[in-house]
Amino acid sequence: MKILVACEMSGRVRDAFIAKGHDAISCDILPSERPGPHYQGNVMDIINDGWDLMVGHPPCTYMSYAGIRWFNVARYGDKALERLKLKNEAIEFFLKLWNAPINKICLENPRGFITKVIKPTQMINPYYFGDSFSKPTLLWLKNLPRLVHSKEDDLFYKKTYVDKGEFVERMQENGKVKKDAKWYYEASRLPPKERAILRSRTFPGIANAMADQWG
């Protein structure tokens, strides 16, 4: 198949499909972190190039519930208004990818405002597919089956689940205690650019599951 991996700089999903013999290319405004077929630029430049499958990772910064407090116009004024504008632009971009002229599409994002616009198909975690990390991730699937994962061995599937990984508790501004995956919490202490890159990488187990089951 001819596969486009949109908004990916890590190359993990791209390389998982290439390993299965597919013609896959990643695309991002940033260069690829590892050697491989990569278009650096706007994905809309190549969206109509006859792809059989697209796996897309639309930017979630302004759609995620994690930054919901910054939308408070009464408190943050123009900063909040600008963020609301960027949120609407992010939703519009997501929908452009979803409505692209490609037969099979998977888009992934964390829980966020896009769920109020279009309902997700499936929720997954890295530990469902062999990586000991927790990161609830939503998938929107078009003409693709849900990714199969298994808590235990049975007649049809081998166990794919592993330990969820470590968690830490932190106090929120509202005084409530929130439990975060340790890796996610440690990423929050990095500079914004490094933090965004780390959190955007697809975990290897999920990338391999996509290639195994959809390839």
Image: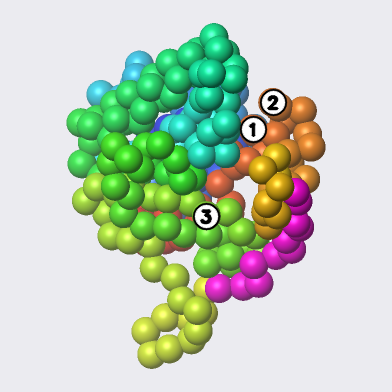
Vertical position of residue 187 compared to residue 73: above or below:
below
With 87 as the anchor, is 203 left or right in this view?
right
- Give the camera-side residue of 49 and 203: 203
With 131 as the anchor, is 214 left or right in this view?
left
Q: Which residue is mark 3?
A: 136
The x, y position of residue 129, in whole percent, is: 53, 65
Q: Disc 3 on helix, strand or loop?
A: loop
The residue range painted magenta reads 161-171
- What residue is at 64 percent from the left and 32 percent from the top? 196
- Callout 1 amino acid: Ala
Q: Which residue is mark 1?
A: 196
- Callout 2 amino acid: Lys
With 149 as the anchor, is 188 left or right in this view?
right
With 60 as the anchor, is 51 left or right in this view?
left
Mark 1 and mark 2 in contact? Answer it, CB < 8 Å. yes
Q: How is the image coloured?
A: rainbow
User: Of circles 2 and 3, which is in front?
Assistant: 3
Residue 167 in magenta?
A: yes
Q: Which residue is mark 2?
A: 193
The x, y position of residue 213, in whole percent, is: 37, 61
